Image (tube, grey):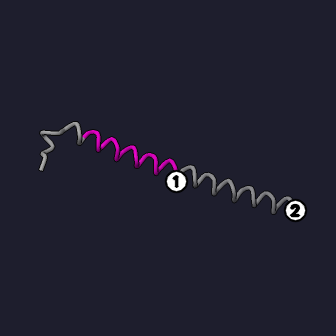
Amino acid sequence: MISTFERPSAVVVHNRAVVHNRAVVHNRAVVHNRAVVHNRAVVHNRASAK
């Protein structure tokens, strides 16, 4: 076992990676949700235009 006191930099790097991954997943979800909402609006506009 390597204690966190011996390798603090590794823990910091790992934590940054975890935070980064969460941010990436969150951003993808936000972009996906925007696309879904946009597509619904487009379909709605086409239906109302007819």
Q: Residue at x 63, y 53 (%)?
A: 35
Outermost residue, front side? 1
Q: Secondary structure at mark 2?
A: loop
Q: Classify residue 11 by image quadrant.
A: top left
Residue 8 percent coordinates (x, y): 19, 38
Instruction: Establish if 8 lies above or below 25.
Output: above
Q: Secondary structure at mark 1?
A: helix
Label 1 CA crowd tier, 10 Å (few <14, some 14–19, many 20+): few
> Along the horizontal axis of the image, is 44 left or right of 49?
left
Q: Classify residue 41 by image quadrant.
A: bottom right
Q: Classify residue 32 by image quadrant.
A: bottom right
Q: Which mark is residue 29?
A: 1
Label 2 CA crowd tier, 10 Å (few <14, some 14–19, many 20+): few
Residue 2 percent coordinates (x, y): 13, 46
Predominant SS along the magenta part? helix
- What's the amino acid at mark 1? Ala
Q: Which residues are magenta?
A: 12-28
Q: Residue at x 63, y 57 (%)?
A: 36
Disc nearest the viewer among 1 and 2: 1
- What's the amino acid at mark 2? Lys
Q: Nearer the viewer, residue 31 or 10?
A: 10
Identify the residue position indicated by label 2 in the image. Answer: 50
